[in-house]
């Protein structure tokens, strides 16, 4: 097992940083600096890897459908204008066409290797609602004039997969906006309990895995009185265990009890492949960004 720390941080100005409620986490008082907690966290990562590698939970995870990237694909070439981009970010959509009233109950998720997986499908109306949110006739907005069932490629815990997707036709675009329609598999019961009283905080979520599988971008929490998060990694043949700590906590100055979200890109020695991305703090797979408002269910 090898352990390394990633100092490679990718920021999206105005997007990657966000305040977290005061009742959620203390950004200064409860977080420890990375220095001094390294051995404790490294030991915890080894425990998590040993618990998961070869376990029934790991086998169940690999048998399921667990997206590790964005479940929405924009029209080819992306959204053309700042107004359309803003509308998408605001979930401001208007429906001017008819959505299908019948569709298959189930669909097939397929990989280049291994057996396909049958998953229940989200209907077009529910899928549209996750895109549109609760905003009605927002300005600016994107106009949906139709939809049909098709497919899209999604990064998953088992590698790239082709999954059923709703293809929404947008007014003014020649190619559709796609949203994965397959219901996510339920996460298995972890073989290890969450850690208590160790430095750092759990990772917020996975943002993306690089096409070559050799880097992972996650969102980590840190306080307002430190120099940002550091994410360490322990790689084994069956898992990639990640954990976040903070760098150079400042003891002086006025420190409010808030936390910030920051993207960190972790470089790996080997491609992720079908290894499980685990959070050392929780002992569970790192949360991924699935469909808006559609939680994993089923088996």
Image: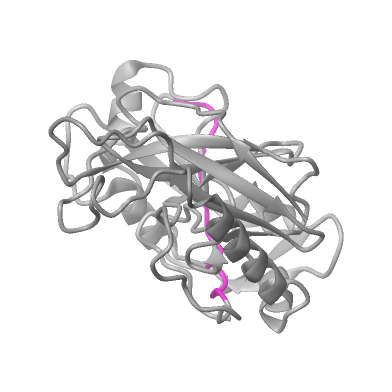
Drawn side of residue 222 relative to residue 47, left or right: left
Drawn side of residue 18 relative to residue 60, left or right: left
Nearer to us in this view, 187 or 72: 187
Q: Quadrant of the N terminus?
A: bottom right
In the figure, 233 relative to 11: above or below? below
Most frequent secondary structure within the magenta stretch: loop
Q: Quadrant of residue 254?
A: top left
Residue at horizontal 71 percent and vertical 83 percent from the top: 56
Nearer to us in this view, 143 or 91: 91
Instruction: Where is residue 152? Give x, y as percent.
Output: 64, 47
**Is residue 177 in the magenta section?**
yes
Check the image and name the residue furthest to the top: 81
In the figure, 253 relative to 137: above or below? above
Nearer to us in this view, 179 or 247: 247
Instruction: Where is residue 262? Give x, y as percent.
Output: 40, 36
Residue at horizontal 68 percent and vertical 53 percent from the top: 234
In the figure, 185 relative to 110: above or below? below
The magenta span reads: 173-187
**Is residue 219 in the magenta section?**
no
Q: Is residue 299 visible?
A: yes
Residue at horizontal 67 percent and vertical 76 percent from the top: 51
Drawn side of residue 194 relative to residue 76, left or right: left
Instruction: Where is residue 19? Give x, y as percent.
Output: 22, 40
Q: Quadrant of the C terminus?
A: bottom right
Check the image and name the residue furthest to the right: 113
Nearer to us in this view, 31 or 172: 31
Q: Quadrant of residue 248?
A: top left
Instruction: Where is residue 226? Give x, y as percent.
Output: 33, 34
Q: Quadrant of residue 241?
A: bottom right
Q: Is residue 152 visible?
A: no
- Colour scheme used in the picture? one colour
């Amino acid at each position: 097992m090898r352990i390394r720390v990633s100092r490679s941080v990718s920021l999206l100005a105005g997007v990657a940083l966000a305040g977290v409620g005061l009742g959620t986490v203390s950004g200064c008082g409860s977080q420890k600096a990375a220095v001094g907690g390294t051995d404790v966290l490294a030991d915890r990562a080894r425990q998590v890897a040993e618990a998961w590698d070869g376990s029934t939970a790991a086998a169940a995870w690999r048998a399921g459908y667990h997206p590790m990237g964005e479940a929405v694909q924009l029209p080819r070439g992306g959204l053309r204008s700042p107004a359309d981009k803003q509308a998408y970010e605001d979930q401001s959509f208007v429906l001017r066409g008819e959505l299908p009233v019948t569709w298959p109950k189930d669909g097939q998720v397929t990989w280049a290797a291994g057996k396909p997986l049958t998953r229940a499908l989200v209907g077009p109306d529910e899928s549209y609602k996750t895109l549109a949110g609760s905003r009605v006739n927002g300005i600016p907005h994107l106009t949906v004039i139709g939809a049909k069932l098709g497919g899209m490629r999604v990064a998953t815990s088992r590698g790239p997969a082709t999954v059923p997707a709703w293809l929404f036709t947008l007014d003014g675009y020649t190619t559709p906006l796609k949203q994965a329609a397959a219901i996510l598999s339920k996460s298995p019961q972890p073989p290890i309990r969450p850690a208590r009283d160790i430095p750092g905080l759990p990772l917020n979520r996975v943002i993306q895995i690089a096409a070559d599988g050799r880097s992972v971008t996650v969102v980590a929490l840190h306080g307002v009185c430190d120099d940002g998060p550091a994410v360490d990694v322990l790689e084994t043949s069956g898992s990639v265990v990640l954990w976040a700590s903070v760098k150079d906590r400042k003891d002086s100055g006025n420190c409010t009890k808030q936390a910030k979200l920051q993207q960190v890109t972790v470089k790996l020695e080997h491609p992720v492949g079908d290894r499980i991305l685990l959070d050392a703090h929780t002992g569970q797979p790192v949360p991924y960004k699935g469909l808006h408002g559609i939680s994993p269910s089923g088996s």
